[in-house]
Each structure stands twice: as structure tokens, then as C-alpha cells.
Amino acid sequence: MVHNVTEKHYFYKKLGINCNIWLAHLISFMQQVDNISDFVSALSRGKHLPEKPVLEHMGIVIRQWCRKHKYEITWFSLDGKIGDEHALYHKIYRQLVDDIISKVVTISSYADYKKHVVFIAEGLMREGFSSFNGLLIDGCNNAWKRVATMLRMYTTVWLNNRGLSLEYSSDVLHHQSLIVLFEKISQMKLIFADSCELKSYYFRILENKSREEHRKVLKSRRFTDIIPERCDEDMLNGPDERVGCVKEQIEKLDGMEKRILSAYFVQEKKLAEIAGELQITAENCRVIKHRAMKRLMNLFAAKKNCNH
């Protein structure tokens, strides 16, 4: 038996439990268990122990391990239930008891106990994630909602860590990346070994989407750079001065040049796609675009000189 408060608090600390929170549940546990050896001995003899404090402690151990190794503790399905942590802890506890009784494992220290709990948890979570992955392939709303919620948070953190939170909308990037993830998983029937692999796959999609957004920004800046900051009143052709300036000068380009610039900057199409639509080579399309941009710059420069 534990004979004084100091020993009790030491054991609480060893279990990693805040005794102020769990004291009421653990007192009855402490009355039956003096240390880890007595705990294992009691389980091996089939002695009944109060499950609640043990399960609570297992939950702490497992959640800490999941955070360290970037596992998602709610991305699993056991016995048809999605992300039921309590059911997971019960399975781990029953497996621990069976292993101790059948002497599959020898636990002589707290470290041994913790290591085996994690070992059981990892196996069950991989098995549960496999079932969860199947739900994602089938388009299960609850499973996808759980994934989307966590990935939305990770997207915000990912952008903040790269200093991109002000430049890009996390909602837009998350939505675009999640659509790609959904299509890949549902159409290609992708199977991931665990939640870490799924998140890594999502982050690769997110990286590609952020690069696409960056290219769009650069395109917009390159196009805007050739537009004068201010146009005279006689250059206006619309409610916005700069828009009127652009329209006036673009009208001076030939048909092919106007179509390519419109498709590239307004419709945000790639040159290869534009070339296919116009039935010309990609290289020819690139040359025409370059020539049109140069002509626009010269037209703006000429207009500016005339005004002076």
C-alpha cells in the first residue's frame, strides 16, 4: 500500500497525471496499486482494478505519442465507429491484460509498460486507419468532415510558418487542395499506411497549389507593370482609368495577339492550352505573346511621350 501523501504524489507524477484533476478517481486506484510491479502482478492474476484511471492515463500516453509522431488520433474506425477514442483505449487495455496474462510481454518497469501500451496503440491505429481510409474512398461524409477540419487548421499553420498568411487565402488554398485530395482518393482508390502519409500527400498538393497562386500573382504583376500609373482624361474608355488605358492600347493589337493575351491573363490559361485552341505550336504561341507584350509597352511609352 501507499502509506503517505508524498508517495501518492510521486506515483501520480510517474503516471504523468495531474493529481489535482484526477485525484478523486486515482485514490481508489492507489488503494489497490502501490507501484508498477504490483499493478502488473494484479493484472496477471486477473485481479479487478478500476479501469477509469488506467484508461485516463493510457489516453495521456497515447495522445502524447500521437502528437510527437504526427498521428491523427481521430482518423480511425474501429467496430464501425469513427474516431471513438474511448473504444480505442478499452481495446488497448484488454490487449494489455491479455498479453500480461499470457506472458507475451514482460513488464518490469514503468518504461516497459508505457512502451507496450504505445506498441498496442500503434497496431490498432494502423488497423483502424485502414478502415478509415476505406470510408474516405467510399466518400463517407463524417470521415471527410473529420479530415477537412484538421487539414483546414494545418493549412493556416503551414501558411503562417512560411509567412504567406497575408498573401494567400488559407480558405481558398485549403478548398482547392481538399478537392484535389478528394478526387485522388475517390478516383484512384489511394491507400495510405497511416494518417502521416495522408497528411504528407495533402501538403504536397498544398505546396503545388500555393505555387500556382504565386505564378498567378507574378503574371498579374508583370501585366500591371506595363500599365501607366495615371492616364489623361482623353485616354479614358471606362470607369477605371487604367482599364480604359489598357483597352485602348489592346485594340491596336492584331486579332491573334489579343486572343492570346486575353486567354493568358484574363482566363489564366497556360500557353500550351492556348496553342492547342488556336491550332498553333506552343513555341509560336510564346513568341506571339512576347511580341504582343512588347508592342503594348511601346504603345504605352509612345502615348506617354505624346502627352508630354
Image (cartoon, rainbow, N blue to C red):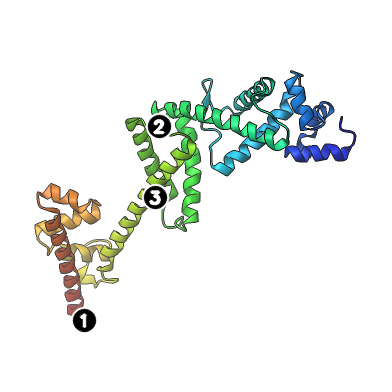
Residue designated by label 3: 207
Q: Residue 230's spot in the image, x, y percent?
A: 28, 72
Badge 2 density bin: few <14, some 14–19, many ≥20, Cα 10 Å: some
Residue visible at 24% across and 56% down in the picture: 265
Q: Amino acid at mark 2?
A: Ile
In the image: residue 87, left or right of residue 34 = left
Give the camera-side residue of 149 and 117: 117
First-in-chain label (2 vs 3): 2
Q: Residue furthest right?
A: 3
Q: Quadrant of the N terminus?
A: top right
Q: Residue furthest bottom?
A: 308
Q: Amino acid at mark 3?
A: Glu
Q: Amino acid at mark 1?
A: His
The span from disc 3 to disc 1 (Cα, nearest Å) is: 47 Å
User: Which image quarter: residue 31?
Assistant: top right
Q: Which mark is residue 191?
A: 2
Q: Nearer the viewer, mark 1 or mark 2?
A: 2
Residue designated by label 1: 308
Q: Residue 171's spot in the image, x, y percent?
A: 43, 46
Give the camera-side residue of 237 and 264: 264
Evaluate whether residue 228 shows in this view.
Answer: yes
Q: Quadrant of the C terminus?
A: bottom left
Q: Residue 271's spot in the image, x, y percent?
A: 19, 53
In the image: residue 63, left or right of residue 49 = left
First-in-chain label (1 vs 2): 2
First-in-chain label (3 vs 1): 3
Give the camera-side residue of 217 and 82: 82
Q: Nearer the viewer, mark 2 or mark 3?
A: 2
